Image (cartoon, rainbow, N blue to C red):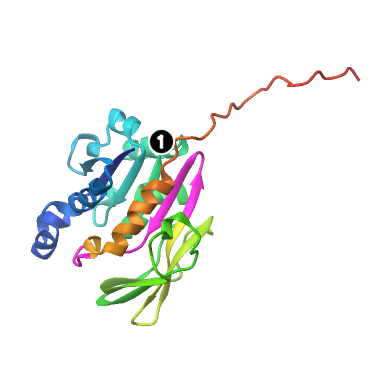
Amino acid sequence: MKVTVWNENRHEKTNNVVAQIYPKGIHGAIAEFLQEDDIQVKTATLEEEHHGLTDDVLEETDVLIWWGHVAHDEVQDEVVAKVKQRVLDGMGLIVLHSGHFSKIFKSLMGTSCDLKWREAGEKERLWAIDPTHPITEGLGQYFELEQEEMYGEHFDIPTPDELIFVSWFEGGEVFRSGATFKRGKGKIFYFRPGHETYPTYYNKDVQQVIKNAVKWVNNDNTPAHVYGNAKPLENISDK
């Protein structure tokens, strides 16, 4: 399996706290723990040509992981269109944290993807509400993050195909923090945790979710459907 981890890589260059937590970038931290599973991982960032998502890279990518925050508008529409087409053709997509406002996620959802938020370093408890789903494999009933940014309902997304996690926050809000969608042949997983000033991607439960999700969204067995005018399979009698 070939995975590409995309990150705008902006906070790591402008915020000393983020740089200290993620010296190799958020993309580097994610790539590092994915490589433990013997997955072929490459990274791509905003400042690279075509944001690192050239036609060749996209064609070779089975699963794309996306993290963005302050530079959504700088992502070229042409690149977004190509990523979307690859998802429709069967590439898996995992959208993390503030990637909910990315052009690619909003385009695939068809909604504003807006929400409530608060940055107060509060506890987040994530409940696995579908314990039979492969994305929850190896987890308990819930896990906790001692410090995270709050996201609260209403989350303006379409009704998920499957709701995997629901978060409760210390301030009282709840949030649909793990949700799956299917678009064309592609499978999509949105996963909420991952604020840049907290070491969330070093948390073993968070890593387990992302590892599980990579396997789930990977789609190497989808039949190729033929569209358009179709010849009959059986003889059609004259009437």
Observer-nearest residue: 239 or 40? Answer: 40
Q: Nearer the viewer, residue 121 or 208?
A: 208
Q: Residue at x 43, y 71 (%)?
A: 141
The residue at the point 43 percent across, 39 percent down is: 87
Horizontally, residue 163 falls left or right of residue 19, namely right
Residue bounds of the magenta highlight: 180-199
Residue, far bottom: 171
Looking at the rendered structure, the secondary structure element under dot 1 is helix
Residue drawn 32% across the image and 31% down it: 60
- How packed mark 1 is, by other alpha carbons closer than 10 Å (few <14, some 14-19, many 20 or more), is many
Q: Position of residue 225 (x, y in %)?
A: 57, 29
Magenta stretch containing residue 188, yes or no? yes
Q: Position of residue 112 (x, y in %)?
A: 43, 57
Q: Is residue 194 visible?
A: no
* Quarter of the image with the N terminus in it: top left
Residue type at mark 1: give it.
Answer: Arg
Residue 147 is inside the magenta segment = no
Q: Quadrant of residue 97?
A: bottom left
- Position of residue 197 relative to residue 229, above or below, is below
Q: Is residue 6 left or right of residue 161?
A: left
Give the labeled residue for mark 1. Answer: 86
Quadrant including the C terminus: top right
- Location of residue 58 with respect to 218 vertically, above or below: above
Q: Nearer the viewer, residue 139 or 221?
A: 139
